[in-house]
Amino acid sequence: MITSDSRALSERKAIVWVVRALSYLVYFYLIVVEIVLFIGFFLLLFGANPSAGFTQWAYRNLDRVMAPFRGIFTPIQLGTTTADVQATFDTSVLFAMIIYGIVALVLSAFIGWLSGRLGQIYSAEDELTRQAEVAAQQAAAQQTAAQQGAAAPADQVSSTPPPAPPA
C-alpha cells in the first residue's frame, strides 16, 4: 500500500503515467509488427508477385522487423507459382511472430500492473483528501464548541431579567 504525502503521490502518478504511455506506444508497435509478419508470411507462403506495389511494401517492412531473426531457420521452398515465383514456408517468420507475441504479452501484463499501481495512487490520494476533510471538519467543530463554551456564560447573564426598580 502506498503511504506518503500528496506531493510524493503526484510525482509517482506522473512517473506511472509517462511509463504507461511509453508502454502503450511500444505495445502498439508490437501489434503493427505482428500484422506485418502475418502479411509477409502469407505473401511468401503463396508466392505473391514481388513486383506488385503492396508486396514490395510488405517485403520491405518484413525485412526490417525480421532483421534479428534472419538465418535462424532455413526457409522451406514449396515450389513455384504460375508466375514462376517461389512459394516459401519461412519458419524464421513464424519464430519471429512467436517471440514478438511473447514480448507483447509481457508488455500487456506490465501495462496491467501499471494500471493497478495507478489505481493504488488514486486510492491513496482519495484517502489523503478524505483525511484532510475529516480533520478540517473536526477543527471547525472544535472551534464552534469553543466559541459556544465561551459565549454560554454571557448568554446566561444576559438572559436573566433585570431587577425590578423599588417602588
Image (tube, rainbow, N blue to C red):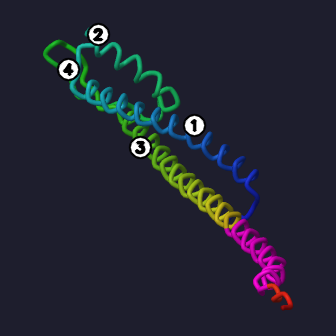
Q: Quadrant of the C terminus?
A: bottom right
Is residue 44 covered in magenta? no
Gap between marks 2 and 4, in whole Å? Answer: 20 Å
Front one among 73 and 42? 42
User: Is residue 36 left or right of 108 when viewed as pictured?
Assistant: left
- The residue at 68%/69% (across/down) is 134
The answer to whether 122 is drawn above or below residue 20 in the figure is: below
Position in image of residue 115 (x %, y %): 53, 53
The answer to whether 2 is drawn above or below residue 30 in the figure is: below
Dominant secondary-structure state across the stretch colored magenta: helix
Q: Earlier in the sequence, mark 3 or mark 1?
A: 1
Q: Which mark is residue 98?
A: 3
Q: Which residue is mark 1?
A: 22
Q: Dot 1, crowdedness within 10 Å: few (<14), some or many (≥20)? A: few
Q: Quadrant of the N terminus?
A: bottom right
Q: Which residue is mark 2?
A: 53
Gap between marks 3 and 2, in whole Å? Answer: 27 Å
User: Looking at the image, is mark 4 or mark 1 nearer the viewer?
Assistant: 1
Q: Earlier in the sequence, mark 4 or mark 3?
A: 4
Q: Dot 4, crowdedness within 10 Å: few (<14), some or many (≥20)? A: few
Q: Which mark is residue 80?
A: 4
- The residue at 42%/31% (across/down) is 33
The answer to whether 54 is drawn above or below residue 88 in the figure is: above
User: Is residue 71 left or right of 135 when viewed as pictured?
Assistant: left
- Per the image, label 3 sits on a secondary structure element best described as helix
- Give amino acid for label 4: Thr
- Per the image, label 4 sits on a secondary structure element best described as strand
Gap between marks 1 and 2, in whole Å? Answer: 33 Å
User: Looking at the image, is mark 3 or mark 2 nearer the viewer?
Assistant: 2
Range drawn in magenta: 134-161
Q: Which mark is residue 140?
A: none
